[in-house]
Structure formats: structure tokens, C-alpha cells
Amino acid sequence: MSVAKPTPHDAALMHVTGKARYVDDTPMPANTLHLAFGLSHVAHGTITSINLDAVKAADGVVKVLLAGDLPAENDVSPSAHDEPLLATGTVHYIGQPIFCVIATSHLAARKAARLGQIEIAEKAAILTIDDALAADSKFEKPLTFLKGEPEDILAQYGEDQTVTGVFELGGQEHFYLEGQAALAQPQDNGDMVVQSSTQHPSEIQHKVAAALGKPFHAVRVEIRRMGGGFGGKESQGNALAVACAVAAQLTGCTCKMRYDRDDDMIITGKRHDFRLKYTAAFDASGKIQALVMHQYARCGWALDLSIPVADRAMLHTDNAYNLPHARIISHRLKTNTQSATAYRGFGGPQGMVPIERVVDHIAHKLGCDPLDVRRVNFYKNGQTTPYHMTIEDSVITPLVAELRKTSDYDARYAAIQKYHADNPDNTLKRGIALTPVKFGISFTLTHLNQAGALVHIYSDGSVQLNHGGTEMGQGLFTKVAQVAATTLGISLDQVKITATDTGKVPNTSATAASSGADLNGMAVKCACETLKKRIADFLAPDQDVQFAHNQVSFGGTSIPFKDAVSQAYQNRISLSSTGFYATPKIKWDRMAGRGRPFFYFAYGAAVTEVVIDTLSGEYRILRTDLLHDAGKSLNPALDIGQIEGAYVQGAGWLTTEELVWDDKGSLRTHAPSTYKIPACSDRPQVFNVALFENENVEDTIYKSKAVGEPPFMLGISAWVALSHAISGCSATGEYPAINAPATPEEVLKTITRMKGESW
């Protein structure tokens, strides 16, 4: 079997040698034109005049487009049709595209785009969560999930058995290695072929078709690979693809657009930042009896994907903990900033962080090991979530028990506690934390849980397949090829996956929600099973036919797979098939907050140990131990790589990656010089990663589990460990209550407060 083997990524060699071709590497005709946007310099206001004479006169400029020049729809929104490609009278954030330059080179387009003279009558801008609350600026009424009677239970507990708090949780820039890019090639029959660095080819197809005033079948979108996506290419690439297609139709030339890194960060949406407000009651063992949680999400100027992101944050407020009485209230706030969008975890991390804060706060108040509080609150099968889904697959207790042992957590925690007690004045403080993950797998918009595939077997026995998933470095293509090889009983080198293409597999969902292998793997398996049956029915009807080891066996006879295929072809047996898969069991009513939004849960846990310098606030991650539940892993090597990267990215979000806007709404951290993603030196000095031995209870592809998003939340342990280290500085016994990201400045600020000093 090809599945379950640590097979290298199909493009690994090309990645490390620089030979892998991305959109920007695509050979182009000599007359290719290049695009750039002219951007708003005001966060909110009315456009009073536009003078583009200097833009039009600039070297290399062929054409300049305003909203009125577009042939059909001026819309690049993935949801509410509230996001025009080019502004139409009002601007809503600094960085909003107002006009589009079409020029003979990338540099010429960028230079010309800076020459526009735009007069804007400024209006009061809503920039912060406080601004939005004061102005009652929101996209919809607050949404509530309710289980039990939390307020009544809270009233039964005194101050010594309750915790309350408010803290800020920052957003995050995607910082994919390959920036946003698109290429549009007009065809001689009026059709359009688009290459886009996108996680959602079908959405690109639909938006381009609407912008051109054409049916979907007139637009074909192709994407072979992305240099990272992380959710930032689920909807944010729409603008580039639409602009290129419109320009290509108007000029008759191939048109290309890619953002400079600064423009990319200024224009595109980020992870939603949140404010979290909680009150929880607990008993003497630390078991949570009731919780009221308010989640304030800053969504930006347009709706984008904020509704499902904020919903998923609510759905993960429990994490791995049973909450017998809970009220979760979500506020979706509208501001004059970039439209926040999908980011790895899609709201799940913003839901998990606050409950880990609650549990940690309870442990601090009880004066016990936070792990003891976590363990007493872990879900048991048969219990229900705050959205009334029954837990049937929990493995968090044995998983944490295994990690606790392999990481030597107990001895390390005891040693740190003793060190704090014995060395109260030492400038270096250590901290350690073990935090769990329970992450739901499925799109919460039910109809998106479907996938198609197309599989060809050629007469020489080689196999070509296509599916709706996109490859962004995560190894999806390799996994799906392994599925095809295993299902057909042939070696992996006989299988080739071609670029994702809306002309081959239509109506696809985004490669998101950690569902790429689940959905597309099943669709490919379905197609392969159909082809196997055709060949088997031809070779030996009513007999048991086996496909394995490149052989087809039946009736005591065995022939090579390629010979079986050749015979089938010569006898006019179809060797091409589609496959389709729809996730079973899921049903969800978001307004009622009831149902089964997820097919299953992926579990994991992390132990992180840190050291901080109390004089500067600087810190290092000393050691990390991860144990993650990937079910029956399709590819352990790829899965471990995903887990390693996800942890570092999650820890980066909560420690170093700080987004800063000024009081005018301008993003000041719009380059690697001011926005710090984790570097190699920031990784744990000791980094142990293992897969938990488990098998999915649900009928997933070869009993595997999703591994794209769930391990991102393992990074929460780094933030909680910093809180534990800071607690060693307390002169008052005060809870650290650190915000995120816990930058060195934030750490030092919290330490200063803990010492009873002013900042």
C-alpha cells in the first residue's frame, strides 16, 4: 500500500532547487501587460475628484481603469457582494483600490499607480473595537450559543470560586512566501483562461465570469501550486484575477498582476483580532460549572468570510473541555480597516485561546498545576458541546497522559515551581505549559462539504488524475496520488496528478477547513473503485478480483495491471471515470446554535517550556513536545512536517507577530522589517514531534484525520508557558493576564505590573 508510507512531497526536489513553477514563473507572450492598483490614502471618506492625467502620461502606460470602465459587475466579494474591485465614490480603508493601471511592465505599472491625484473628503473612521462599539458598527446582531443556565449557576458561586477577565488577542498577517498573483490569457473565441495563486479556483471562475458578463463555462481557471496560502488565498486573490481578466478582455493581450510585499500587506485581509471577556465559576477541583464568554471580532470594512470565521470561534470556545452551562456571545464589528479574512484555523484559534486563559486563571486562583484543572474538565464521550453536538470520538485523556509521560512534564513543572520559590530575585524565569487541542473538521457551511475527481487510466497502465483541491505546499497532491495508487493496487510512480483545473472538475470547494485530503481523497477513491469494477467485470464477472502489487488476480490467475488495462481497452471498456464525495452526518443550524457541524474532531497536545529575561522581556522557547492525532496517517512524513510548521506559526501569532495601525488607520507593520514572523532561531531548541496511535472512528479516507489546521493551536502552549514564567515575578499574587501577541514589550509591561510598579 502507498498510503501510510512517509513518501516525499511530489515537488520536494523542485522546491529546494528552485525549479518549481509558480504563477510568476509562467512563460508569457512578448506583448504581456502588467497591472497595478492606485490605492486610497484615507481610511474613510468620499472621493471628490480624480485626476489621472499624470498616470496616463507615464512611461509604458497603455490604459487606466476606473469603476465606470468595467464591462459588467464590479464585485470581488466572496459572500455579501459588498466589496467592489474599484471604489465607487466612497473609500473604506487605507489601501483600497481606486483605479487600475495597465502598463508594459510591472515596474512601469507600479510607478504610474503612485501618480494619481485623488481628492477625498475625509469622514470619521472607525478603527478599533472601542470605536465600533461606541458607534454600534456591526455586520449583524450578536449571535448567541446557549447550553443550560449559566447565569443562574454563576450566581451560586462567590468571588473565591469565580474568575473574570478581559484581554486582547491580535490578528496575523499570512506572510505566504509567494505573494498574490494572477495571469489572464484571452482566447480567440472570447473565453478566458486564468492562472491564479488561489485556494479556491471555482470562486475565481465565478467572479471573473461575472466581471466579464459571461457564463461560467467561458472561464477556465488553472493552478498547479502555491507558495503558501494559509487561508489568505481563499478570497483575497479575487481582485487580481478579476482585474487581469477585465484588462485582458479590453486590450486583447495577456495580462498579469502580482502584489509587491508592501502592497500585499496593505491591501489584503488578516486574521481577525479579537477582544475576549469572560466570567467562569468552578468547584473545589477546578471543574468549570458555568461560563459566559463575549467574543468581539474586528472584521474590517467588508464582510468577506467574517461570519463563518466568527461562528467557528464560537464553536471552539469549549476546546477540549466539557462546559455544562455556557453562554457564548459573538459580536461582529465593522471597521475602516482591511477586511479580515480566513487564516489557518479559520476562527478556531480565537475560540480556543480564551478558554485556555480561563483554565489557567482558575488554576492560578486554586494554586495548583494548570494541568490538573485541564484534566478534570476534559470531555468524556457522551457529553455534549455548547452547540449540542454529542462527543463520540474523544481521545484527549489518553493522548495527554501519553504526552505527559514522554515529555517528563511532572518533574519539569515541579522543578520550575521550586526554582521560582528558591530564587525570587533571579532575573531569568522559566515557565511550562501543557495545552490540549480539539478541532472540528468540516465546513460549517454544509453544502461546501463535497468534492469531485476525474481519473484516467491510459492503455499502458499509467494513471492521470485531477481533483478540486489545490496544492499550497501541504502535500495534498502526494496524499491523493497515494490514495489512487493504493486503491488501484499499483506503484505510486504510475500515478500523475495534473494541475487543478475548473475545466476538468467543476463546482469545487476551497481547499480549506483542513478538508483537502478528506474530500478529494474520497472522491478519487470513488473514481478508482468505479474503474476497478469495470475492469473486474470484464476480466472475471462474478469472481473475486484483487488489485495489488501491480497485478490483477482472479481465479488462480494473475496478470500485470498494465495487461489488464490493455485488454479492457481493446474490448472497449471505458477507462475514465469521475468520482464524487459528500461528507455524511453533518447538519447545522447556525442561528439556533444547534446541530452537528463537524464530521469528527482531531486532537492533539503540546508541552512548551520557555525562559524569559525579566529585565528586557525577551524570551526563548527552550523545548517543545508535540503529540498529535492524525488518525491512520496517510503520510507520516508530510503530517509531521505540517505539525512542526503549524506549531511554529501558531506560536509566532501569539508571541512576535504584532500588527499595528496608527490613529489614521494606516498599517505601520507592512514589511518584514516591522512585522516579525518566527525565524529559524525562534524555533524550539529541543523539538520533539510524534503522531498519536489512533484510528478515526468515522469512515474517512483510509481512517486518517485532517492535519492542516488542528496543530496550529498547539502553539497556544507557548503563550500559556510565558504566562507561567511571568507568574514567578509576582509580588502580589496577581494573575499575569498577558495579552497576545506576547511580544517582549508586552511581557515586560506585564512583569512591571506584576511587581506592583508603574509602566
Image: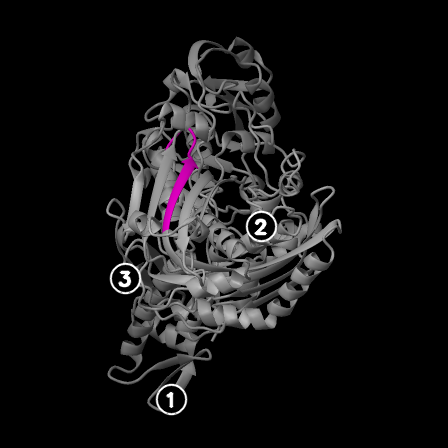
Mark 1: few/some/many CA within 10 Å (<14, 14-19, 20+): few
Q: Is 139 in front, or is 363? A: 363
Badge 1 or badge 3: first in the primary sequence:
1
> Mark 1: which secondary structure?
strand
Identity, as a three-letter code, of the amino acid under mark 1:
Thr
Residue at mark 2 = 719
The numbered mark at residue 669 is none
- Residue 301 belongs to the span the image colors magenta: yes
Asked whether residue 293 is drawn in magenta, I would say yes
Q: Quadrant of residue 657?
A: top right
| Spatial separation of the CA atoms under disc 1 and disc 3 | 38 Å
Residue that badge 3 annotates: 584
Q: Tell me if residue 682 comes above or below residue 672 in the rendering.
A: below
Can the viewer see residue 612 in this picture? Answer: yes
The label on residue 557 is 1
Please state which of the two labelled residues, at mark 2 or mark 1, is closer to the viewer. 2
Disc 2/disc 1 C-alpha distance (Å): 61 Å
Image position, residue 580 (x, y; %): 30, 59
* Residue 189 visible in the snapshot: no
Q: Which circle, 1 or 3, is nearer the viewer?
A: 3
Range drawn in magenta: 291-303
Question: Would you say 684 lies left or right of 22 here?
Answer: right
Element on which disc 2 rests: helix
Q: Which quarter of the figure is the C terminus placed in?
A: top right
Q: Earlier in the sequence, mark 2 or mark 1?
A: 1
